[in-house]
Image: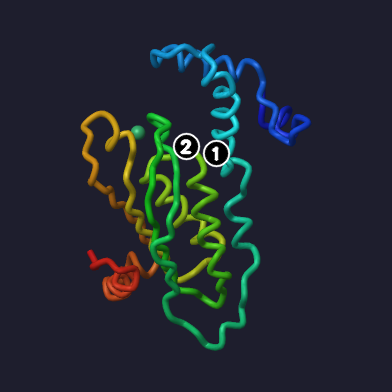
Amino acid sequence: MNYFTSERRLFNEDGKLVVPDDVQDAVRKIIRWAGDDPTREGLTDTPARVARAWREYCQGYEDDPGLHLSRTFEEVGGYDEIVVLKDIPFQSHCEHHMAPIQGKASIAYLPDKRVVGISKLARVLNAYAWRLQVQERLTAEVAQCIWDNLQPRGVAVVIEARHSCMTGRGVRTPDVGMVTSRVLGCFLDDPVSRKEAFWLMGRTGR
Ligand SMILES: [Zn+2]
């Protein structure tokens, strides 16, 4: 069944998203598998809550990231320097464990005639982050979306994040942050531009 198209607009009288029985059953199975009793009082409403929370965590699937960059401004008063949005906090979930990823992204681009409202870059980030992800792909997708839609002279995206699947289980390394970056255009070709972009993002160049 495709819940996406057939069930997404069903709401109960409290205005809450209706969660199909088989989805709730799936959560009950996980609870039982984890070692608890899904029929005990404290867990009665948990399956529906979990299911609704997951639709929120994954709301990026209902978003078209490129659409946020469709309204651009061409009148920039001769500004032809790098635009940077630094340390944008985000949350995502890893596609391997469905565990939270928490991090910050910095996005830089060198416009070629067109710029966007700065909040739009954060919207692009969230449209990809609110999905099941791996950090490398998230970084690449954000950079590519800006590259394709704004056609700037260069784009650089740096993401630093902590993965709960590493900090809360497995090797349990609480303070380890993972850093990924993707550079395109002049930031890839020209070391001086790249250095400037990374410096503006608060990072030393590479
Ligand atoms: Zn993971």
Q: Is mark 2 within 8 Å of ligand 1?
A: no
Q: Position of residue 7 (x, y in %)?
A: 72, 28
Residue 141 falls left or right of residue 191: right
Residue occupying the far right of the picture: 13
- Pointer 2 with pointer 1, Cβ within 8 A: yes
**SS at circle 1:** loop
Residue 184 in view here: no
Percent position (x, y) of residue 33? 42, 13
Asked where in the image residue 21 lies, by quadrant, the reply is top right
Dividing the image into four equal quarters, which quarter contains ligand 1? Answer: top left
- Look at 63% across and 42% down and name the residue there: 62
Mark 1 belongs to which amino acid?
Answer: Cys
Mark toward the start of the polypeptide (2 vs 1): 1
Residue visible at 50% across and 84% down in the picture:
79
Q: Give the left or right position of residue 123, taking residue 169 as reference.
A: right
Q: Nearer the viewer, residue 32 or 81?
A: 32
Vertical placement of residue 14 versus 121, above or below: above
For residue 183, what is the image quadrant? bottom left
- Say which element carries label 2: strand
Cα distance in 3D space between marks 2 and 1: 7 Å
> Label 1 crowding class (10 Å Cα cut-off): few <14, some 14-19, many 20+?
many
* Quadrant housing the N terminus: top right
Q: Which residue is mark 1?
A: 58
Q: Which mark is residue 132?
A: 2
Q: Amino acid at mark 2?
A: Leu
Q: Nearer the viewer, residue 97 or 30?
A: 30
Classify residue 84 by image quadrant: bottom left
Which residue shows up at 40% across the image and 66% down it?
Answer: 86
